[in-house]
Image: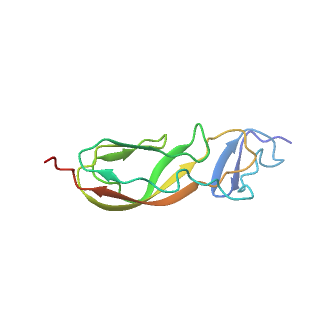
Amino acid sequence: MSHPSFLCLSAGLVLLVGLSLGGCPIDNSWCEGSAPPVDPAEVTNATVGEAYAQQFTAFGDGEEWSVMDGELPPGLSLSEHGLLEGTPTTEGEYSFGLRSIAPTGESECLVQPASAPYTLTVDAAVVAG
C-alpha cells in the first residue's frame, strides 16, 4: 500500500518523499574512502598593498568553499568557488582552515567534505628608496 508521503531519516537528514513505504530512495550514508586532497597544499606569502590571488580546488567544478576556522588576513576574501583574493592591509601571520563541499548530484551516498589548514604570512609593504 502506498502512502502519500513519509519521512526518511538517515545520516541526520530529513527527506520528504512521495513514494511507497518501501524505504528511502537514496542511501544517505557516507561514501567509503576519504575526500580528495585540497590543492595547493601550501600558500605563498602576500605583501601589504599588493594584489593577491590563490585558487583552491578539491572536487572540481561545482564545489562550494568556505572558511571553517581561523581568520583570513584583512583585505582578503574567499569566494564560494575557492578563489582567495584581494589586497592585504595588515602584516602578520594568519592561520585558517578551508573546506570544500562536493557538488550535489545523483550520487548514491554523501561525499565527505575536503578540508585543509593554512598559514598565510603577509609581509610588510616594500618601501622604495
Q: Position of residue 57 (x, y in %)?
A: 55, 45
Residue 54: x %, y % from top left: 43, 45
Front position in the image: 3 or 32: 32
Residue 24: x percent and y percent?
77, 48
Quarter holding the N terminus is: top right
Residue nearest the observer in this picture, 120 or 105:
120
Relative to the observer, which residue lies in front, 10 or 105? Answer: 105
Residue at image position (33%, 47%) is 76
Q: For the point 16% across and 50% down, which residue is it? A: 127
Report the residue that reaches farthest toward the left: 129
Left or right: residue 95 versus residue 63 is left
Q: Splitting the image into 4 quarters, where does residue 3 fall? A: top right
Which scheme is used to colour this image of the protein? rainbow
Depth check, front residue: 22 or 118: 118
Q: Residue 10: give x, y in percent of width and height.
A: 70, 56
Q: Residue at x 16, y 46 (%)?
A: 128
Query: Residue lying farthest front?
Result: 129
- Direction right: furthest residue: 1
Q: How many marks?
A: 0
Quarter of the image where one finds residue 112? bottom right
Q: On screen, 95 above or below 87?
A: below
In the rendered image, the vertical position of residue 78 relative to residue 73, given as above or below: above
